Image (cartoon, rainbow, N blue to C red):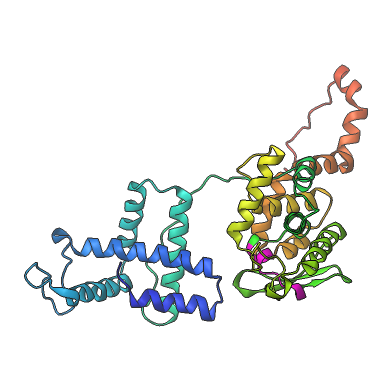
Amino acid sequence: MQEYPIIREFLEYLNYERHFSVHTVKCYSADLIQFGEYMSRQESSPEAGFGKTDAGESLTPENQSGGIIATAVAVDTNTRMIQSDVTVIRGYLTFLNEQNYSKATIARKLATLRSFYKFLVRRGRISSSPVTSIRTPKQEKRLPRCLDMEQITKLLDCPDTNTMLGARDRAIIETLYSSGLRVSELVGLNLSDVDFLGEILHVRGKGKKERLSPIGSSALQAIQRYLTFRDADRRKETFDQQAMFINKHGQRLSTRSVRRKLDKYLLMAGLDPKISPHTLRHSFATHMLNNGADLRVVQELLGHQSLSTTQIYTHLTTDRMKKEYDNSHPRIGFENTQSIATERTPLPLPAKPFGY
């Protein structure tokens, strides 16, 4: 796998200037390296006119020796990535489609290219982005999965809270549901991030943005029980002294470990194994809206930068909206009282359509 200087420069920008998470930077890196390898394969195609160094020398088998030519190809690909036009980008999207990538994946890879070329414009490497005129593929809207309260209760009842690890798992599920945290935010919590008196969590979210998130008394009680077991453990001096949630070896818990633990309890509770830690975040948002919370408040609680991201949860709250509509709209009561009269004598139609 070749290393492309321009990709490295962009990733350093994401990491040190934009403060993106390690996971996000890794995804951008994978997408751009794939694009670079696609460009490299195109260069080796004789009919494409690629496969030449910047000096115009053909990369024939006779002069492709050692790492010198590999470096030349990488440098040439690096240059072509910078100089790509809209035709190249469209060709790449066609290639992805032919490889049977889903629309969602293609949309994500296109978003990566948008960010990449926007970065090049800002750095003065190119005058305009070749991605500007390309539309994102239309995707099917998928509503987030959500648990009801009975399912939440079943899940919470599964961990054995008479052991340190069981009490920890109960505290994890309680915290995810109580505060709507991302699993990466949960495992990033430190002991000092919990304000038991103020019932507040100090959360470090995406892009290293920090926020304060309320946490309920049930979750705090579960955390307190877990910490009581942890403080009584004879190995406590060897534990990570900062991390809130630790594994059996005393080190900070990983996101993958949280998923494995949840899978175990889903099986015990007889719930859908496709449920993920993020489902608890979806459930938190949906239940908040169903019980009358303001959309902008939920946006703040979730740490969403854009309100449109939060609005997807409004699709799951139609029952509440219908009840509010039935109880509040003045014509609903009028229609009910006039129903018998309307059955006997139809109301006269207006002479002209409304609004004219």
Is 34 or 309 nearer to us in this picture?
34
Does the rendering let one see residue 144? no
Query: Quick check: is 124 in the magenta stretch?
Result: no
Is 189 magenta? The answer is: yes
Quadrant assignment for the C terminus? top right
Depth check, front residue: 292 or 339? 292
Chief secondary structure of the magenta span?
Answer: helix
Q: Residue furthest front?
A: 234
Which residue is more in the foreground, 84 or 276? 276
**Image position, residue 165 (x, y; %):** 72, 57
Q: Report the residue at 14% width, 80% height from top.
A: 55
Residue at (13, 76) in percent of width and height: 56
In magenta, the rendered stretch is 184-192
Extreme left residue here? Answer: 62
Residue 32 is left or right of residue 40, and the answer is right
Residue at image coords 46%, 69%: 115
Q: Quadrant of residue 127?
A: bottom left
| Of residues 189 and 237, the one drawn nearer to the viewer in this rendering | 237
Q: Position of residue 155 (x, y in %)?
A: 74, 45
State the image coordinates of residue 90 (x, y, percent, origin top left).
34, 57
Q: Kindly tell me whether residue 76 is visible in this rendering.
A: yes
